[in-house]
Image: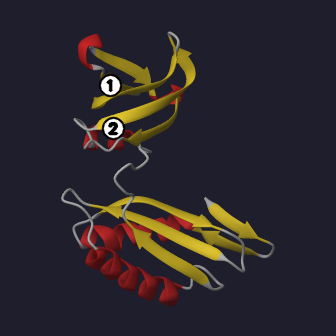
């Protein structure tokens, strides 16, 4: 994917590859990356994660390393703001692997097409297999939902 402006293009996949190398070299996971805005207000947002939680020091370390590499490589030919953070407690679930990684955690799914009369379903993630997200609904048992039918999914904070 390229972010394009007249006469210029930014190779977002190349940026993602560099971010992935930096993040994994520090024992972290690249959760997501997005490039937003126009040439005068470009924002590169990098979300990092790890099992026991992301610290401010983790964000600072990744930010410093990634910024240095991006400056040398000159992949974004105009000024930009780099933001490195955790995806948060109620993070979006984006990739199929997210549904496996967070198995056992509570999640809310918003469906494109309702199942029965329900479009919003909440339960404990029970994994992902064959294009289907498994959700433990307690007494109602474990149900499966086609990933293609899920318009939005996020973790729910349990207190």
Count numbered badges in the picture.
2
Q: Which residue is mark 2?
A: 99
Q: Specify whether 35 is left or right of 45.
A: right
In depth, the one of 130 and 27 nearer the eye is 27
Q: Which residue is mark 1?
A: 134
Tell me if residue 76 comes above or below residue 16 in the rendering. Answer: below
The colour scheme is secondary structure
User: Residue reaching furthest front?
Assistant: 159
Which picture quadrant has residue 125? Answer: top left
In whole angstroms, how far apart are the C-alphas of marks 1 and 2?
8 Å
Quadrant including the N terminus: bottom right
Q: Position of residue 48 (x, y in %)?
A: 35, 64
| Residue neighbourhood size for the residue with mark 2, other residues' Cα within 10 Å, grouped as few (<14), some (14–19), many (≥20) | many
The residue at the point 33 percent across, 42 percent down is 97
Which picture quadrant has residue 145? Answer: top left
Q: Specify whether 116 is left or right of 50.
A: right
The residue at the point 22 percent across, 35 percent down is 104
Can I make out residue 130 in this image?
no
Which picture quadrant has residue 50? Answer: bottom left
- The mark found on residue 71 in the picture is none
Tell me if residue 152 comes above or below residue 39 in the rendering. Answer: above
């Amino acid at each position: 994917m390229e972010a394009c402006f007249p006469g210029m293009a930014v190779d977002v996949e190349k940026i993602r590859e560099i971010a992935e190398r930096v993040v994994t070299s520090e024992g972290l996971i690249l959760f997501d990356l997005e490039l937003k805005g126009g040439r005068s207000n470009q924002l590169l947002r990098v979300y990092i994660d790890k099992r026991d939680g992301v610290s401010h020091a983790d964000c600072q370390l990744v930010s410093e390393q990634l910024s240095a590499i991006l400056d040398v490589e000159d992949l974004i030919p105009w000024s930009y703001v780099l933001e490195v953070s955790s995806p948060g407690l109620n993070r979006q679930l984006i990739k199929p692997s997210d549904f496996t990684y967070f198995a056992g955690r509570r999640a809310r799914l918003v469906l494109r097409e309702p199942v029965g009369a329900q479009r919003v379903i909440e339960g404990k993630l029970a994994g992902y297999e064959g294009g289907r997200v498994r959700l433990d609904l307690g007494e109602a048992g474990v149900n499966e939902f086609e990933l293609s039918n899920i318009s939005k999914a996020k973790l729910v904070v349990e207190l």
